[in-house]
Image: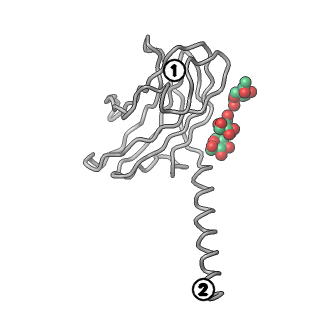
Amino acid sequence: MKTSRQTMRNQIISCLVFVACVVNAMAKTPYKTCGSKLGVATNVSVSGCDSSPCILKKGSSIKITVNFTSHADVEKVEDAVSGIIDKIPVPFPTPHPNACTTKGISCPLKKGQNYTYTSSTPVVASYPDLRLIVRWAIKDTNGDYVFCVLIPAELK
Ligand SMILES: *[C@@H]1O[C@H](CO)[C@@H](O)[C@H](O)[C@H]1NC(C)=O
Ligand SMILES: *[C@@H]1O[C@H](CO)[C@@H](O)[C@H](O)[C@H]1NC(C)=O
Ligand SMILES: *[C@@H]1O[C@H](CO)[C@@H](O)[C@H](O)[C@H]1NC(C)=O
């Protein structure tokens, strides 16, 4: 049987966990937009990151959420993610690049409509420690971006 002290302790713990979850969910991540012809990002959230640079823990999984507005009807979109290291973009393949199927948005995109894009990507443990700028975008079949954001980050 639980003593009331244990019960109280459990309540405090679940409260702390709950607050941590809310803070995490509310995290507003510093970012800049890069040029995107077919739309624009309006809000970005990377799990656990509310300051710049984002610390990306190797061996963990990061979740990125991007609200964006489409400025055109777009048939299909796919991820276009790079790590910019010393000004040189290095393509970063995402596990499921088709952004129409696994990212919470439905295609075709409609002009003037708001969407919430969500993706989870592993941060591979074997990457070296370095600072980089993550360029996260989605593009149509012509390679034109629907949104494009730059997020300063550090792999640790
Ligand atoms: C951006 O998204 C976060 C998390 O979804 C939310 O808490 C925040 O209010 C949003 N920012 C704006 C400007 O709406
Ligand atoms: C971002 O999308 C979420 C989920 O649809 C919504 O709750 C939030 O208000 C949106 N934020 C902005 C800035 O549009
Ligand atoms: C889309 O989002 C923008 C920016 O958050 C907002 O100003 C606009 O009213 C939204 N439009 C629709 C159709 O929800």
Judged from the image, the secondary structure of the residue bearing numbered disc 1 is loop
Q: Is residue 51 above or below residue 140?
A: below
Taking the spot 63% from the left edge, 87% from the top edge, the residue there is: 5
| Residue type indicated by callout 2 | Lys
| Quadrant of the drawing holding the N terminus | bottom right
| Residue type indicated by callout 1 | Gly
Judged from the image, the secondary structure of the residue bearing numbered disc 2 is loop
Find residue 13 and report its horizontal and vertical position in percent: 59, 73
* Mark 2, residue position: 2
Find residue 10 and report its horizontal and vertical position in percent: 60, 77
Mark 2–mark 1 distance (CA, rounded to whole Å) = 59 Å
Taking the spot 48% from the left edge, 44% from the top edge, the residue there is: 63
Find residue 126 and report its horizontal and vertical position in percent: 25, 48
Q: Is residue 7 left or right of residue 141?
A: right
* Mark 1, residue position: 35
Q: In what quadrant does ligand 3 lie?
A: top right
Residue situated in front as seen by the camera: 116 or 149: 116
Q: Is residue 93 above or below residue 121?
A: above
Mark earlier in primary sequence (2, 1): 2
